[in-house]
Image: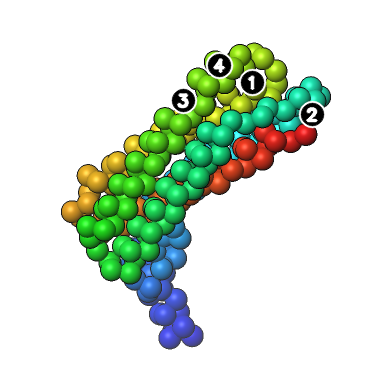
Amino acid sequence: MPFVKASVQRTWDIAGQGKVPGGDGSPLGGGPLMPTGQLFVWLLIVGVTMLFAALSSAAIVRIGIDGRTLSLPSTVWLNTIVLLVSSAALGAVQWRVRVHRAVDALALRLLGVAVGLGLLFLVGQVATWMGLVRAGIGLPSFPAASFFYVLSAAHGLHVVGGVVALLLLFAVRKRALLFRHRLGPVATYWHFMALVWVGLLAVLQVR
C-alpha cells in the first residue's frame, strides 16, 4: 500500500539520521539508559566487589582453618562510626542539592564534613595499625591479623580515591549543574565504601 510504504520509508530515513521521535538523536530515542559517570562508577563497584569477595573468601577459609580470631581494637569501631557519619553527611549534601537545585553554603559545609571525616578515618586506620604493631601483632602473626592488614589496606586505598573525588567536587562548586552530575556517582561510590567496610569487619569476626 503506498501510504504504508511511504510511512515505513520515512521512519527508516529518520532513524538513519539518528533522529527517532523521542527526541535526543539516539537510535532508540529517550536518551542514554544511564549517565556515563554513573555507569563508570557501577562498573568500578562491580570490580571492587569482585576483589573484596575474593579476599574475603580466602580470609574466611584461612581464619576458619587456623581457628584464631583477632580482637579488634576500639579504634576500629570508632573509625567505623566516623566513616558512617561521613557517608550520612554526604547523603545530606545529596538531599540538599536535590531539594534546592543549587550548591549553597550549607551543602559545601556538609561536603567538607564528609571529606574531613574521610581523612580522619584514614588517620584512624594508620593509628590502629601502629597500635597493633606495638602490641606485637604484625602482618605475619596469624591469618586473622594478616587479613586485617590486607583488607584494611586495600579498603584504605579505595577510600583515598574517594576522598580525592570528593575534593574535586569543590573545584566545580560554582557550576551547579556539573556539581550535581558529578555528585551522584561520587556519593554512590562513597556510600559503597562504607558498606564494604562494615562487611569486612563481619568477615574478620568469623569464628
Q: CA distance from mark 3 to mark 4?
A: 11 Å
Task: Give the residue number, with chain letter if any, for mark 3.
Answer: 126
Q: Earlier in the sequence, mark 2 or mark 1?
A: 2
Q: Nearer the viewer, residue 175 or 80?
A: 80
Task: Give the residue number, with chain letter if any, for mark 2.
Answer: 64
The answer to whether residue 169 is left or right of residue 77 is left
The answer to the question of whether label 2 and label 1 lie on touching residues, with beta carbons closer than 8 A, is no
The answer to whether residue 80 is left or right of residue 98 is right
| Residue type beneath disc 1 | Ser
Task: Give the residue number, with chain letter if any, for mark 1.
Answer: 146
**Category of crowding for the residue at label 3, using alpha-carbon neighbours closer than 10 angstroms: few (below 14), some (14–19), many (at least 20):** some
Task: Give the residue number, with chain letter if any, for mark 4.
Answer: 133
Viewport quadrant of the C terminus: top right
Q: Earlier in the sequence, mark 3 or mark 1?
A: 3
| Residue type beneath disc 3 | Val
**Category of crowding for the residue at label 1, using alpha-carbon neighbours closer than 10 angstroms: few (below 14), some (14–19), many (at least 20):** some
Residue 151, horizontal then vertical, whole percent: 58, 29
* Between marks 3 and 2 in the image, the one whose residue lies nearer the viewer: 3
Kindly state the secondary structure of the residue where label 1 is placed.
helix
Q: Earlier in the sequence, mark 3 or mark 2?
A: 2
